[in-house]
Image (cartoon, rainbow, N blue to C red):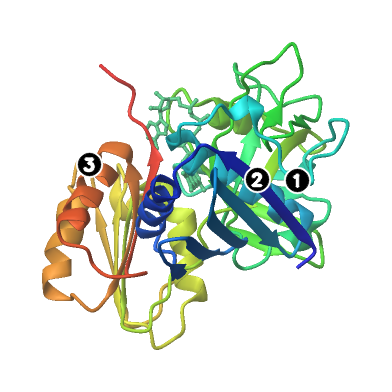
Amino acid sequence: MTGRATLALPGVPFATLRGVIRREALEHGLDLHIDAAEEVSIATPFGTLEARALDDGAELALAASRADRLQTLKETVLDHVLDDLPVAHAALVWSDAPAATEPPPNFRFAEVRKVAPLGTTFLRLRLAVPDIRAFDDSALHFRFLLTPDGRALATSPGTAPNGSLVWPAEMPAPHRPVYTVRTIDRDAGLLTVDVFRHAGGRAQGWAETARPGDRIGLLGPGGGGLPTADAGLNLYGDETAFPAIARIVESASAETRGRVVLRAGAGAACGYPLVAPSGMEVIWHTGVFDLAAQALADRAVWPERAVWFAGEKAEAHQLRAAFKAEPPGRGAAQVGAYWTRAAG
Ligand SMILES: Cc1cc2nc3c(=O)[nH]c(=O)nc-3n(C[C@H](O)[C@H](O)[C@H](O)COP(=O)(O)OP(=O)(O)OC[C@H]3O[C@@H](n4cnc5c(N)ncnc54)[C@H](O)[C@@H]3O)c2cc1C
């Protein structure tokens, strides 16, 4: 491990911290290596997180093999752990915080090399990414960094002592949508991303007008890694999940059994390319098909199979609630909210 950092959380009861970490582990299908009254340890695809009780509170310790992964872990901790604790974020300081603000190690500008339609509802972008070796097989996702009105970011962000990103003064709150690394060509330094052409999106709008030579800020990689499929795997998703599902089925062993249930406005006619092992049945649906209900119905038939789901936030919440009532077991379910329907 080359990256290590600790964070003191004075006044935070360890039991509260442990409860938040356990909940996140369950939600994201991660293993708790230690889960004791005074210590918790969890392995993520990006490194390890340990928490322990102190006399006056608690302490977090992170370890990762690279500085960019350590930064990704810090951002994950801020969003998923510290947000739910009684602490003032601004007062927190990681042990390795630099004296002066520096660009985050997980930020890079990529260069657009190619943009082309993929089927009827996607754009495929090929991006040249410096330090592409950071994107290994556990790196499923990254974030585009855009201005609030959807233009490419011109300046690199900085890093605050608590691990959060510091934005240029003229841009207090950039837009940071998550996208999936569809393919990685490490020798050529190229990454492929498939952007769903839904109406009114800022990243989607940027992609529609992107041209070779344009620069775009990327943050990451991040994400939960590929699901294990030893006892079978059922996957469910709408268009936003197609790139992740395509990558998962491509990397699954030829013997994998399961089903891939996809929902798209025009169904299979959208022409999104997806090649699954022969033991995985691929089923397309159109329109308003209830993916979460299908995932639950299939679970009753194949309780041994891992479940991977990604779709609209309300659907994801519905499925998570059902799994909370009847937990599928450690690592057996990953449920992602990939987009949020506008209110009204
Ligand atoms: C882990 C993860 C991986 C993802 N991978 C991909 C990927 O590889 N490709 C991809 O295209 N998307 C992917 N998404 C989804 C993507 O991040 C969202 O769709 C995001 O909102 C798109 O950003 P935007 O700037 O285009 O739209 P925004 O500016 O954020 O949203 C504008 C409007 O578009 C609506 N909108 C957003 N998504 C959709 C949708 N799917 N259908 C209909 N309306 C929508 C919103 O409700 C909003 O009203 C992923 C999301 C996650 C969490």
How far across and how far down the image is residue 221, in percent? Answer: 65, 52
* Badge 1 amino acid: Ser
- Is 278 above or below relative to 248? below
Count all numbered tags in the image, as a single digit: 3
* Quadrant of the drawing holding the N terminus: bottom right
Q: Secondary structure at mark 3?
A: loop
* Quadrant of the drawing holding the C terminus: top left
* Badge 3 amino acid: Gly
Q: Which residue is identified by label 1? A: 95
Residue drawn at (29%, 20%), measured in percent from left and top? 343
Residue drawn at (65%, 21%), measured in percent from left and top? 147
How far across and how far down the image is residue 29, in percent? Answer: 39, 63
Q: Which residue is identified by label 3? A: 287
Q: Nearer the viewer, residue 193 or 12?
A: 12
Do residues under tags 2 and 1 come within 8 Å of each other at their CB atoms? yes
Q: Nearer the viewer, residue 203 or 72?
A: 72
Residue drawn at (20%, 45%), measured in percent from left and top? 318
- Tell me how far mark 3 sits from mark 1, CA to CA: 50 Å
* Badge 2 amino acid: Leu
Foreground mark, 3 or 1, reads: 1
